[in-house]
């Protein structure tokens, strides 16, 4: 169905990867005497770009060393993907999108190497061929630019499309682009996601409210604003 798309964040949305990311941050930050607990991860790392994480946690390093350290972290994460699985209901939702002729894309602040490795490990690379990476644009999330680029590349309009996010950073980005946003409560509770701009929060993609929302959105006239 032309003009409608589903836009997915990756980490914490298509895959519950926060525990593996936290473990990688702990390993790489430990030599600098930086301890990262779950609360710190949720408050300062969750959904943030690596550029921002470097400024927040490694201000004593040069920008080049910040990038190298965070690249080391990402390599440690990619080495630990064995056994990961999509969030429940993801495959069925993509089947539903196929039946409706919906476009789809991944919109992430993760590095492209991570996105490609994770999608391959999940068995979703062929079904989610468009991947927008925040660091490759002028501005990453929470700016709306990544989602605006996702709409551009899918040929979709915001008023007929739906985004899926798990962090306040991502929710704000998608909402500012005019998208209806469903929050995945993999790390945060539904209230925090709604406060950031999500319409509602779900435990996984099997929640029946998702299909109802998509059907409502794609039925809207293409020229209607969100």
Image (tube, rainbow, N blue to C red):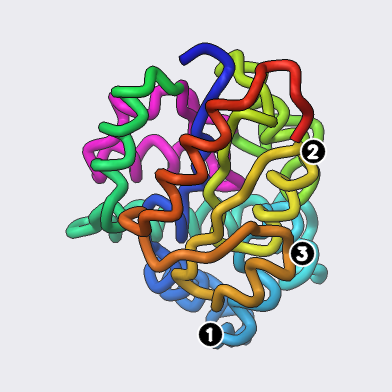
Q: Mark 2: few, some, or many residues within 10 Å (few <14, many ≥20)?
A: few
Any magenta on residue 131?
yes
Q: Residue at x 76, y 58 (%)?
A: 52
Q: Residue at x 53, y 81 (%)?
A: 30
Residue 139 bears which disc, if any?
2
Give yes or no for contact between labels 3 and 2 (Cβ–Cβ under 8 Å): no
Inter-mark Cα distance, 3 to 2: 23 Å
Q: Residue at x 31, y 30 (%)?
A: 125
**Going from the N terminus, do you reach mark 3 or mark 2 first?**
3
The residue identified by callout 1 is 38
**Is the C terminus in the top left, top right, bottom left or bottom right quadrant?**
top right
**Going from the N terminus, do you reach mark 1 or mark 3 first?**
1
Q: Mark 1: few, some, or many residues within 10 Å (few <14, many ≥20)?
A: few
Q: Residue at x 31, y 23 (%)?
A: 98
Q: Position of residue 68 (x, y in %)?
A: 61, 52
Name the outermost residue toward the left.
83
Inter-mark Cα distance, 2 to 1: 27 Å
Image quadrant where residue 65 sits: bottom right
Nearer to the camera, 194 or 221: 221
Q: Position of residue 200 (x, y in %)?
A: 57, 62
Any magenta on residue 78?
no
Q: Secondary structure at mark 3?
A: loop
Residue 61 bears which disc, if any?
3
> Which range is magenta?
103-132
Inter-mark Cα distance, 1 to 3: 24 Å
Q: Secondary structure at mark 1?
A: helix
């Amino acid at each position: 169905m032309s003009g409608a798309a589903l836009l997915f964040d990756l980490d914490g949305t298509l895959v519950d990867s926060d525990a593996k990311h936290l473990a990688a941050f702990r390993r790489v930050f430990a030599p600098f005497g930086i301890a990262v607990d779950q609360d710190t991860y949720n408050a300062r790392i969750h959904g943030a770009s690596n550029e921002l994480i470097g400024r927040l946690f490694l201000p004593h390093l040069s920008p080049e060393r910040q990038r190298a350290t965070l690249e080391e972290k990402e390599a440690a994460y990619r080495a630990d993907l064995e056994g990961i699985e999509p969030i429940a209901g993801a495959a069925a939702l993509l089947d539903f999108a196929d039946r409706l002729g919906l476009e789809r894309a991944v919109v992430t602040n993760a590095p492209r190497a991570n996105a490609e490795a994770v999608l391959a490990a999940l068995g979703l690379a062929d079904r989610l061929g468009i991947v927008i990476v925040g660091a490759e644009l002028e501005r990453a999330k929470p700016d709306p630019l990544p989602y605006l680029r996702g709409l551009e590349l899918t040929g979709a309009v915001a008023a007929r499309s739906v985004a899926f996010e798990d962090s306040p950073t991502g929710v704000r980005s998608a909402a500012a682009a005019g998208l209806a946003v469903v929050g995945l409560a993999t790390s945060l509770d539904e209230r925090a996601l709604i406060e950031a701009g999500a319409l509602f929060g779900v435990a996984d993609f099997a929640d029946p409210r998702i299909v109802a929302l998509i059907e409502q959105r794609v039925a809207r006239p293409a020229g209607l604003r969100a």
